[in-house]
Image (cartoon, rainbow, N blue to C red):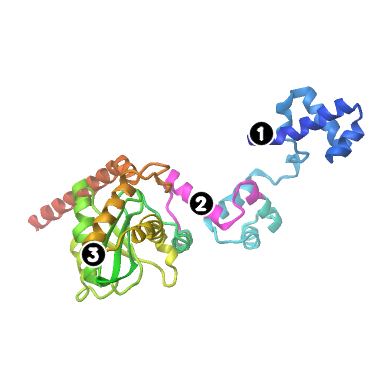
């Protein structure tokens, strides 16, 4: 049953019951409606049929009570100019320039234009920037950056195409007899959700860098796509001084930007955390009950088999996957990354040529 049918059905039921009983009062009492509602339903049904019963509201806007159009425009403009202002502050600022509107009036106008919360005002500002290409003020930039940090702290990551942002994490698999402690280096492309994992017996900067060097970078090179940025937590295997830290040094050599999560907010890297849980539930929990592993290579072989299933066969419900497999999403959108990479390379070559020409004329 659709939403429209759910709205219409009880109203049609009231009209039909009154016909069967031959008594409006009894029908209204049985179904819990007033007689006034019955006669409104009947009048609408007689005029427009069942479709007229879809939306019934006695609230009608009184346009003559609304503020002038130039006042409404000023209130909307200040919402985008200073999105962090509340209704009282906005009202006071408008009074300084001769526009008299109460704080309640500001709230009503914002609500009418879907600007009544800070999140809505910031989204409207982002939309305006994207459509009109306006130059942001310092206050607007500050609020947008603040909102972006807040979203990232709650696990909302901005990603535009495959290779735009990768997420890496260390997952403790367990302690195996004859092997010892086993750690998994996890890597996820945040756009396509393509995952990769490699097992180690230690958790160090060298193993974190080896994961990228052995699996991640060769894959992206094979696809002709650069990996632009990596998101990790603040673990010692990922963070340190450039001169003495293998992982930081590797990223610097490869030209990959390094972003770190906020302290005590593991949900910032929630994509990796969710992948680790999925792999535990769908692979490790069953595999470790079916088989006794005596070597790391044996466990890695079975993990690789599951990863092939995950990337190539298993439908994913991620934001950009929409029921497709991670590799289907990756292949469908990698042309965007390739085009962007070519544009960046062209700009760099043009800039280098200009610098060379300028130097030759000195």
What is the distance, in whole Å, between disc 2 and disc 3 at their CAs? 49 Å
- Specify which label sits upstream in the sequence, 3 or 1: 1
Q: Residue at x 42, y 42 (%)?
A: 323
Q: Which residue is mark 2?
A: 123
Rendered position, 59 above or below 360: above
Rendered position, 92 above or below 110: below
- Specify which label sits upstream in the sequence, 2 or 3: 2
Give the quadrant of the C terminus: bottom left
Q: Which residues are magenta?
A: 109-138
What is the distance, in whole Å, between disc 3 and disc 1 at their CAs? 58 Å
Element class at badge 1: helix
Residue neighbourhood size for the residue with mark 3, other residues' Cα within 10 Å, grouped as few (<14), some (14–19), many (≥20): some
Q: Nearer the viewer, mark 3 or mark 1?
A: 3
Instruction: Say whether residue 160 is left or right of residue 255.
Output: right
Element class at badge 3: helix
Q: Nearer the viewer, mark 2 or mark 3?
A: 3
Instruction: Say whether residue 349 is left or right of residue 99.
Output: left
- Residue 193 lies in the magenta stretch: no
Give the quadrant of the N terminus: top right
Element class at badge 2: helix
In the depicted view, which residue is nearer to us: 179 or 74?
179
Q: Residue at x 27, y 63 (%)?
A: 293
The percent position of residue 103, horizontal first and vertical second, equals 69, 58
Q: Which residue is mark 1?
A: 4
Q: Which residue is mark 3?
A: 296
């Amino acid at each position: 049953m659709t939403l429209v049918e759910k709205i219409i059905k009880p109203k049609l039921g009231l009209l039909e019951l009154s016909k069967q009983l031959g008594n409006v009062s009894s029908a209204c009492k049985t179904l819990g409606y007033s007689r006034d509602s019955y006669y409104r339903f009947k009048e609408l049904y007689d005029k427009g049929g069942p479709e007229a019963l879809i939306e019934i509201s006695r609230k009608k806007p009184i346009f003559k009570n609304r503020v002038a159009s130039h006042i409404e425009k000023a209130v909307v403009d200040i919402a985008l100019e200073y999105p962090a202002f509340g209704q009282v502050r906005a009202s006071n600022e408008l009074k300084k320039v001769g526009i008299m509107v109460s704080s309640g009036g500001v709230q009503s106008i914002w609500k009418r234009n879907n600007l009544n919360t800070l999140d809505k005002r910031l989204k409207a500002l982002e939309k305006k920037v994207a459509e009109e290409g306006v130059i942001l003020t310092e206050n607007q930039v500050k609020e947008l950056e603040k909102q972006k940090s807040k979203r990232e702290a709650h696990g909302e990551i901005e990603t535009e195409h495959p290779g735009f942002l990768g997420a890496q994490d260390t997952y403790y698999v367990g302690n195996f007899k004859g092997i010892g402690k086993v750690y998994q280096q996890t890597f996820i492309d945040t756009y396509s959700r393509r995952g990769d994992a490699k097992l180690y017996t230690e958790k160090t900067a060298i193993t974190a860098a080896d994961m990228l060097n052995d699996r991640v970078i060769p894959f992206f090179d094979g696809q002709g796509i650069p990996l632009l940025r990596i998101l990790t937590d603040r673990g010692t295997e990922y963070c340190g001084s450039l001169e003495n830290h293998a992982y930081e040094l590797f990223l610097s050599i490869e030209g990959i930007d390094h972003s770190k999560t906020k302290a005590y907010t593991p949900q910032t890297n929630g994509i990796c955390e969710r992948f680790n849980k999925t792999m535990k539930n769908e692979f490790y929990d069953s595999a470790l009950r079916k088989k006794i592993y005596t070597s790391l290579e044996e466990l890695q072989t079975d993990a690789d088999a599951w990863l092939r299933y995950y990337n190539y066969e298993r439908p994913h419900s991620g934001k950009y996957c929409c029921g497709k497999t991670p590799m289907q999403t990756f292949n469908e959108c990698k042309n965007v990354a390739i085009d962007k990479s070519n544009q960046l390379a062209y700009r760099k070559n043009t800039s280098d040529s200009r610098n060379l020409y300028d130097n030759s004329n000195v």
